Amino acid sequence: MKLTPDYCVMMARYNAWQNRQLKASFATLDAAALNADRGAFFGSILGTANHLLWGDRMWMARFAGTPAPTAGIPDSPGLTASRADWEVERFRTDGDILLWAERVRAVDLAGDLRWHSGALGREVSKPMAVCVVHMFNHQTHHRGQIHAMLTAAGAKAPVSDLAFMPEHGPWL
C-alpha cells in the first residue's frame, strides 16, 4: 500500500472539521444528555468522544512521539471529565495531528511501525501506511457512532461527507 503525505493532510483537516462540528453539536446538549448511557460500546456520547480522543493520542504517540495516554482502553471513556475539558484536549490533539500531517514525508510512511500493544499484551509490527489509515478510519468509525447517538438525543448531527468538506478555511 502506498500512502502519500497529501492523504494525511486531507484526513487531518477532515478530522479537525468534523471535531469542530461535534463541538457545536455537543454545545446543544446538557451534561446529562452527553453522559447518558446510550448502549454504545463506550457508553455515552462523551465517553465515545473521549475514547476517540484517547485513540488519536495513542497513535500520535507512536507516529510523532507526543505523550501517550496513561490509561488503557477500558478507562478511555473517562479521559476528560466534561464537555469543556474535552473541547480543550480535542483542539490540542487535532493540532498535533495536523502538524504531524503537514510535516510527514513519503519516507516516513514507508516500512513498518513497531510498538507494544496494551490491548494485545505483546509487541506488534504493522506497515506504517496501514497504521495511519487505521487511525483515520478509527476516527470515522467512532464519529459515526456519535452521529447516531446525537440524532437519537434530538441534536442536529454534523455533515460528515468528505466530499463536502470546505477546501479552504480554519482547520482548527
Image (cartoon, rainbow, N blue to C red):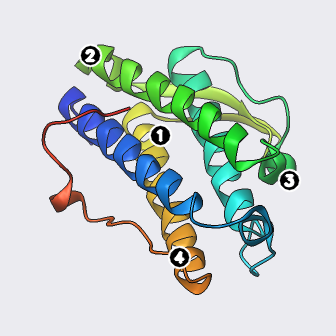
Residue to which mark 2 is pinned:
105
Q: Is residue 130 above or below residue 61?
A: below
Label number found at residue 155: 4
Among the two numbered marks 2 and 3 on one chain, the one whose residue lies closer to the N terminus: 3
Could you tell me which secondary element the residue under label 4 belongs to? loop
Look at the image and tell me in which quarter the N terminus lies.
top left
* Amino acid identity at mark 3: Pro
Among the two numbered marks 3 and 1 on one chain, the one whose residue lies closer to the N terminus: 3
Disc nearest the viewer among 2 and 3: 3
Indicate the position of residue 92 as horizontal and vertical percent values. 55, 26
* Amino acid identity at mark 4: Ala
Could you tell me which secondary element the residue under label 1 belongs to? helix
Could you tell me which secondary element the residue under label 2 belongs to? loop
Q: For the residues marked 4 and 3, what is the alpha-carbon distance in whole angstroms? A: 27 Å
Is 53 positioned to the left or the right of 131 in the image? right
Q: For the residues marked 2 and 3, what is the alpha-carbon distance in whole angstroms? A: 34 Å
Among the two numbered marks 4 and 3 on one chain, the one whose residue lies closer to the N terminus: 3
Indicate the position of residue 29 as horizontal and vertical percent values. 64, 67
Residue to which mark 1 is pinned:
131
Disc nearest the viewer among 4 and 3: 4
The residue carrying pointer 2 sits among few (fewer than 14), some (14 to 19) or many (20 or more) residues within 10 Å by Cα, namely: some
The residue carrying pointer 1 sits among few (fewer than 14), some (14 to 19) or many (20 or more) residues within 10 Å by Cα, namely: some
Residue to which mark 3 is pinned:
74
* Residue at 83%, 42% in the rendered image: 72
Indicate the position of residue 160 as horizontal and vertical percent values. 33, 64
* Amino acid identity at mark 1: Cys
The residue carrying pointer 3 sits among few (fewer than 14), some (14 to 19) or many (20 or more) residues within 10 Å by Cα, namely: few
Among the two numbered marks 4 and 1 on one chain, the one whose residue lies closer to the N terminus: 1
The residue carrying pointer 4 sits among few (fewer than 14), some (14 to 19) or many (20 or more) residues within 10 Å by Cα, namely: some
* Residue at 79%, 48% in the rendered image: 76
Among the two numbered marks 4 and 2 on one chain, the one whose residue lies closer to the N terminus: 2
Does the residue at mark 2 contact the one at mark 3 (Cβ under 8 Å)? no
